[in-house]
Image (cartoon, helix red, strand yellow):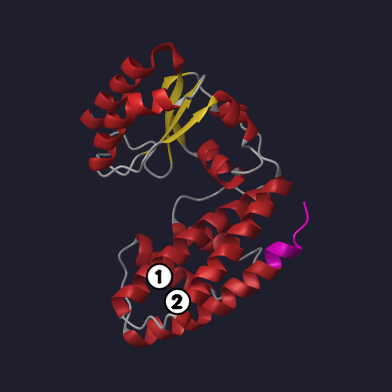
Amino acid sequence: MKNLDTFLEELKFNLGDNLVSVFAFGSQANVEDAKNNLNLMVVTNQLTAENLYAISKPVQKWVKAKNPIPVIMNRDEWYSSFDVYTIEYADMKDNYRLLYGEDMVPSISVNKYFLRLECESEIKNLLLKYKNNFLMNIRSDREMKKVLNNVIKTLVVIFRSVLRLHDRAVPYRAVDIVEHCSEYLSFNKVVMTKLAKMKYENDDCNKQELLFMESELLKDIQTILKQVDAMHF
C-alpha cells in the first residue's frame, strides 16, 4: 500500500486543514493489500482551481500506478449530490473504508425515488450505446467480448440497486447478484449468468454462444428498461 500512503501524505501536505475526508470505495475498498484499481473519494471544505493544481502531480502519479482518478468534491457538493448520484452513494454506503479525516458516509441518505430514476437513466444510456454497436457492425469476437463485458458491468450495478430498492442485502459475487435479482426482473438468467462469469470469473465462450448472447442482450435490456420504468417506490 506504499502508493496509497504516499498519496495520502501528499494530499494532507498540499491541502492542509482544507482536507476533510478521504475514503476508499468499491470492490477493492476493504482489500488491505490492494496494489491498484482503488477508487478514492476526497472531500474538501473549499475547492478552487488552486487546490486542484496543488494536488495535480500527486493525482497523476496515483493514476499512473493504475488507479482510477479520484473523485474530488467540496463539502457542499457532497451533500447536494445525494439525489443525482444515488447509485454511487448507495454503493459507497455498502462498501467503503475510511482512510483519513471525517467519516462522511453515515450522512448518506438514499432516496428510493431517485435511486429508481437513476437506474432508468443508466439503462436508457446503456441501450443507446448497445444499439450503436449493431449500427457500427462490430463483428470482431474480441471487440464484442469487450462490449459484453461493459454491458454486464453496468447491469450488475443496476441489479445491485434493484435489490436495494426491494430492501434486499446485496451479495458480493456478480453471479449471485444476477440470481437474486431474477426474483424481481425478468431476463435470460442463463445469458446473464454466463456474462457475469466471463467478466468476473474468467469464463470463456465459443463463437456460437457469443452470437446468441449478443442477440439476447438487446431484448433483455429493452425488457429490463420497461420493468424498471414501471416500478414505484
**Residue at coordinates 55% horizontally, 49% vertically from top-left?**
170
Q: Position of residue 67 (x, y in %)?
A: 30, 42
Q: Nearer the viewer, residue 186 or 75?
A: 75
Q: Position of residue 139 (x, y in %)?
A: 35, 83
Q: Which residue is mark 2?
A: 133
Tell me which segment is drawn in magenta: 227-233
Q: Which residue is mark 1?
A: 147
**Residue at coordinates 55% horizontally, 76% vertically from top-left?**
188
Q: Earlier in the sequence, mark 2 or mark 1?
A: 2
Q: Position of residue 201 (x, y in %)?
A: 33, 62
**Residue at coordinates 50% horizontally, 18% vertically from top-left?**
102
Label 2 vs label 1: CA separation? 8 Å
Q: Could you tell me if the residues under marks 2 and 1 are in contact, i.e. CB atoms within 8 Å?
A: yes
> Farthest front residue?
49
Secondary element at tag 2: helix
Tell me if residue 186 can be seen: no
Circle 2: is it few (<14), some (14-19), or many (20+) Cα within 10 Å?
A: some
Res 228 → quadrant: bottom right
